Structures are given as structure tokens and as C-alpha cells.
Amino acid sequence: MNERLNNLRSRVFNKEYKQYRQSPMPDLSAELDIPHLSWMELSSKITQKMCELEQAVILPDERIVFTRTVPSVVPFYSQAISKKLSDGYILHELGPISNICADWGMVLSQGLIGRRDIALASRERLAEDHDAIAFLDNAIETIDAVLDLVKKYSSAAEVLGRHDLVEMLNHVPAHPPRTFHEALQALRILHAMVWLSGNYHVGLGRFDQYMWPYLKADLECGRLTVNQAEELLAEFFISLNKDSDLYPGVQQGDNGQTLIVGGVTSEGLDGCNELTQMVLRVGRDVSMIDPKINLRISAQTDLELLSLATELTRKGLGFPQYSNDDVVIPALVAHGYDLEDARNYTVAACWEFIIPGKGMEVVNIGAVSLPYAVDQTIRKGLQSGEDFHNIQQRVKDEIQSQVETVVEPYRHLFLPPAPYYSVLMDGCLESGRDLSYGLKYNNFGIHGSGSSSAAEALAAVKQFIFIEKSISPKHLLSGLDDNFSQDKDLQQKLLNRGPKIACNSDLADEMLIFLFDALADACERINDNSRGGILRPGTGSAMYYLWLAQGHNGMREPVVAATADGRRHGDPFSANLSPSPGVVTDGLFSLFKSYSKINYHRIYNGGPITIELSDAVFRNEESIQKVAMLIRIFAHLGCQQLQLNSINAAALQEAKLHPELHRNLIVRVWGWSGYFCELAPEYQDHIIKRALYT
């Protein structure tokens, strides 16, 4: 990167943008505490007020502008009024709509003025529909508020004599961009405004598909060189990191600023283009936690592209994350997605598959604790003297019960209106309905967490109690009850001799298949989620790999005691699809073979195979090629999703002792990357253990 970009990047790393934030936060409670306003009207007024409060910040060397100055979004209602309005309903996570993706290509192609014209036409056509008129009026108000904020930036640019910015801001995002630069500037503002409206986990979708026409035109007419385009893209990436500390998540960095590149087009053709590779190169060179880059691949993906992606992995950023089109697209089609939409999938904040502009899907309503289901049934089954078949039936019943328990509250889900977000979605302005009413796809997603430990516990019981008869039921139950404190030999036998995932154990793999089939069966029995959708099971763990093991304030899921795979109470589970902590695998090919046996046709909510690789693996060009071939093997074997991490255990331990010297150290946590020194100690410790086991 050149000196200008390095300066911009350094300012963000040093958090210099914080000096522009208004302190104290303006008190708007009295101004917005208007009892007769509907939730829709309040949502619109919050967007308007936040845009009104924002102050224009333009630094001398910036070519893509917007720096947030209002540090927090005004709550919709007081806690008491909010509770009254949502009485009898459940709010998802923080309440506002999150973790979906706008149709950025559509919005850019029409501009906000074009979107407003559509709203005005619908208003005239739906004049007798009072609900539609109310929504459309509020949507138009948010459009005007954003345009007023852009005018504020244009005026500030004029005062500074920045005529380049004045011309650009007078055109976008009001009108369709004419250049790649204008498209990046428009996207920066349109995207930031969703956060400013109170929504969160806002992704950027299929970036190389909707942005490519602008770049292609610039390159073809000589308006830009590749180097100039990369400089603009790098600045855009840097700008996404300026506000991210204000974005909510389980941990700092868990903000959902994802984008995806590669894969097929909606017509089924190869969608890779020059921008696909440019995103990977620029992500590698910028080396910041946002945006979190995903790459769609297939068994035919070019090794050169996979090698470039591996160079990005080598940086230790924890991305790109890979999704296999050969597996994902057919699974989505099999569950009601139109082929054209399925081909256009992107990922949500972590890994779940969603459709830009057409999905109001809640892809993470909770988790099924597979270790708890297995542990409880092993204990009850052995105490009752049951055979292994009956224990497995108990497991299936317990998984079914957990699924129903997780889903039941969401039958009463309340999604607050989001008039500005609706402007960015397909069909909302045309139909006169806010996206909270639902879009084309309204499915729920659920995680199946702790699968390795659960499968290994079941396999150990079958192996040692029912096949070998080398451990008695009473002996195992006693060890579980006292957390193996009195019988280390038993624990070591379970840990070291028990069947393990990724160790070429047919028995462990059989149990893994059984568990996910049981999860799919349970989800398929729920054929209506109360919003006209279905329940999608996945293989992710999210934060549950710690929560299920150690507990978390307010969580519904039970804490899991000691388990029959030799794990002690309190020890964490592995993240997503990965070997249990401490297990020495038979190699990566064996690992892929184990996880390729899952029926991803039915388990399709995402959740990557997560592999930690020593940074020494990436030492030279030959090593890079080998890792690229490894990724191709993953795709050839029919696995669904892959996440590779390059880590150094010594560096992580040093960073925990001396965080002031490692502020910019980036790690993959679960479905997202963050700065190691900003994580809570329990997450730091788990990542260090993962590195040591590598």
C-alpha cells in the first residue's frame, strides 16, 4: 500500500476516529417519547434524527468519506414501553432486525431517488391501503433523511475545496453510480445508514457480482488502472473499520461485516472476475478484521485462485471462509429456494446461507446441545440397563425435545419495523409492506453444536460397554458423576483409546452421521415456523462451544457435565466441525473424510470445518500450492464449508502477557475474526489451546 493508505490505516488502528464522536451523546429521550407514535413511525424518526445529528467529517487525504460521530443509536422506546408493546412476543437477540443482506446491486442500479420514485408510485396505486401508505411515507422520510446527510457532506467538501467529492456526493447515492469510485462511495453511505438506523450484523453480499460492472467499465475505457482500482478498494475496506467498535456482538469484532466473492452467477455461469481476485489481494494487503471475506468455490475452482486465497489465510486473519457451491446450491433448491436465488446465495454474519434482498430469515434462533442430548441419554439408559439401540432412540427423542424447546418461543417472534432497511430490499416498496412482515424466504436456522464430543461419547459407550465389554455401565457412570477425579485411568482410556472423529474411525463417523440425521429429522417435523418458513439445521457452534460447557448468563441451554469421551466438566467443546480439543487426528484427509459423510442435503444452515494450521505450513510457494490443493480436496469430497486458520501458539501466549505489544494481532474466533487482545480471557484461552493442539 502507498503512504496515503498506510496513513489512513494507521489512524484506524490508533482509533483516531474517536475524537470526532459527540460526547456526551445527545439526549433525545424526551424528543422521541411520543406515546401515540407507532413503532414504524419511531423507527423512521430515529433514522431521521440520527442523520440530522451526524456531523460531516472529511479528512484531507480521504477519497471515500463517512465517519460516524453519533456514538450510539437512540432506543426505540423506554424499556417499560418496549416491554408493553412486545408483551406476549419474543424479540430476537437485541430486538431490531439483523443478520440479513440487502440487495445492494438493485439499490445501486436505481439510486435512492429511483427507490423513492417507486415508493411514490406505489403510494398512488395503494391509496386505499392505510397500512401501506403509513409504511411508504415512513420509508420516503428515511430516504430523504439520508439524502440530507449526504448534502451535509457535500457542503463540507465544498468548504474544503474538495470539488472531486462535491461532484461525487451530488450524484451518489441519490442516483446510480457512473464509476467504480462512485459505487464504493455510495455503498459506504448506504451500508452505514443501516447501522445508524439501529439494525446490526449488516453484510455486504456478493460484492464482486454487483460491483464488477462499474469496475469493468472503468478498466475498459481507461478511466482506472488496476492499481488505481485497488487503491480505492483498499480505502473502502479501511473505512469499514472506522465504526466497527460501535457495532454490537458477543465479542468485539463479531459485527457481521461480511462479503462473499466467487461462485456461479444466477444463470449458473462462472462468476469469478478480476474483482474476485482483487478483493483477495486487497484483503491480504490491508490486513484488518473487516470486511470478513468469504469465497465460494467448487471442485472445478482454479488452483491459482485458491493459491491467492491461501496467501490471504497465511496473514493469520482467519479468512477467507470457503463455501462449496456443489453442495450448498442443491441443498437450498431441495428445500424450497428457486434455483436462480440459490445460485445467488451469500452468507450471514458467520456462515449461514441467505439470499440478498429476498430473505427475512432468522438463521440463529439457538442451539441444540448434542453433547447434552447424548450425555443425558447415556446416563439414563445405562442406569436402566438398556441396550445401545434404546440409548440411540433416547438421543433422538432428546434432540427432538430440544428442537421444539428452542423453536416454541419463536412462534411468537416480533420483528420491529425497519423502513430504511426495507428500502434496500426487493419488493417492499412495490408491495407497500415493511420487511418485518416477511419476504420471499422466512426460514429459521438452528445450530447443532458440540458434535465431535457427542459422537465420540456415543461411540465410546458402544465400543467399550457393548462391544468389548471392557468398561461396565456402573464404572462409567461413577466416573462421570465424580468428573473422573477418582479414576484417571478411566478418563485416559476414554480420551486415548476411544473412537475419535477424524481418526479413520468408522464407529465415530457412524455416530456423527446418526446425530445429524436425528437433528434433520427433528427439524423436518416442524414444517411451519409460524412465519411461513421451515427450520434449517446446521453444523455451526457459534459461541455455544463455550456456553454449553461453562454456562452463560441468561442462556436457555443446559451446561454439560463430564462426558463419556473423557472430557471433564467445564472443558470447552470444539468449535463448529473440528476434532475435540486434544485429539490427534490421522491427518487432514481423514478429517475431511469424516465430515464429508454428513448429509449436507439435509444439514444446510452452514457451519464450517474449522482447522488450525501452524504458520510454518505457509512458509513458501510450494506450501501455498499444497494448501490450495487441500482446499480442492475439501470440495471434491463433497464437504460444505471450510475455515482455515494460520496461528502461532507462542505469539498468542506472548500477546496475552503483553497485549500492548500486539494490538493488531488478528485471530478467527468462530464465524468471525477479531483482535486477539480485545477478546475476553475465556476466548483467548480457548484459541491458545487450539493453537497448542495444532
Image (spheres, rainbow, N blue to C red):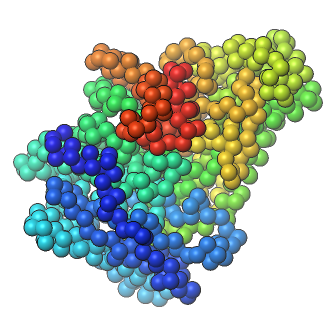
Which of these two is toward me, 7 or 176? Answer: 7
Seen at 58% across and 75% down, the residue is 78
Q: Hey, which quadrant is residue 541 in on the image?
A: top right
Nearest the eye: 24 or 257 = 24
Quadrant (top left, top right, bottom left, bottom right) of the N terminus: top left
Q: As drawn, is 451 to the left or to the right of 681? A: right
Query: Residue at 44% of width from left, 50% of height from top?
Result: 256
Residue drawn at x 56%, y 61% as measured from the top left: 94
Q: Judge from the rendering whether residue 295 lies leftward or rightward of residue 134; answer left or right.
A: left
Image location of residue 382, percent across then percent down: 88, 27
Picture coordinates of residue 444, whole percent (x, y): 59, 53
Vertical side of 362 occupied by 673: above or below: above
Relative image position of residue 287 (x, y in whole percent): 31, 38
Would you say residue 679 is visible in this rendering? yes
Q: Is residue 11 above or below residue 19?
A: above
Give left or right: position of 551 versus 32. right
Nearer to us in this view, 86 or 431: 86
Mark yes or no: residue 517 visible.
no
How many marks are shown on the rendered structure? 0
Q: Quadrant of residue 120?
A: bottom left
Residue 280 position (above or below residue 87): above
